[in-house]
Image (cartoon, helix red, strand yellow):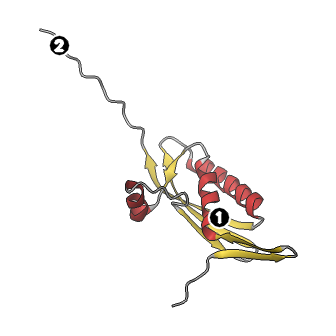
Amino acid sequence: MAEKNNSLERRGEGGSIRIADEVVGVIAGLAATEIKGIAGMSGGIAGGIAEMLGRKNLSKGVKVEVGEKEAAIDLYVIVEFGTRIPEVASEIQANVKQAVESMTGLAVVEVNVHVQGVAFPQPEPREEEHRVR
């Protein structure tokens, strides 16, 4: 069975340049997590298992389709409670588009943001009051 090569290849005078889809995914994932109001990326069951095993997947929650000159990106995010989701999603779209285009030279045709959950603040543990008798 032939293995699918998921990468962008450009040929020039000095040779060729290959950019793997995973590289675009890592750039997009990091750009998305820079935005205030994002609690994290949603990686599903497989992503959770990898994290428990100690392997951090930097493209977790990112699906990338790369053509010869264009890219489409889907991001699966978890937002922090109390944030305005449309504003956060718009900021993610702009930041991811700018980061991928500037680093790879690809034209990003769409950045789809899928909100998969809301993270609630964790209550601080209360110190139990000990009574001295």
Q: Where does residue 41 sit, x and y in percent of width and height?
A: 51, 55
Using residue 62 as the reference point, say whether residue 91 is left or right of it: right
Which residue is located at x 36 percent, y 33 percent?
123
Which callout, 2 or 1, points to the residue nearer the camera? 1
The amino acid marked with disc number 2 is Arg
Residue 131 numbered mark, or none: 2
Q: Where does residue 110 sit, x and y in percent of width and height?
A: 68, 66
- Residue 28, by quadrant, is bottom right
**Alpha-carbon neighbours of circle 1 within 10 Å: few (<14), some, or many (≥20)?**
many
Q: Where does residue 1 sit, x and y in percent of width and height?
A: 51, 91
Which residue is located at x 32 percent, y 29 percent?
125
The amino acid marked with disc number 1 is Val
Q: Where does residue 106 sit, x and y in percent of width and height?
A: 75, 67
Residue 10 numbered mark, or none: none
Tag 1 residue: 24
Q: Is residue 8 above or below residue 125?
A: below
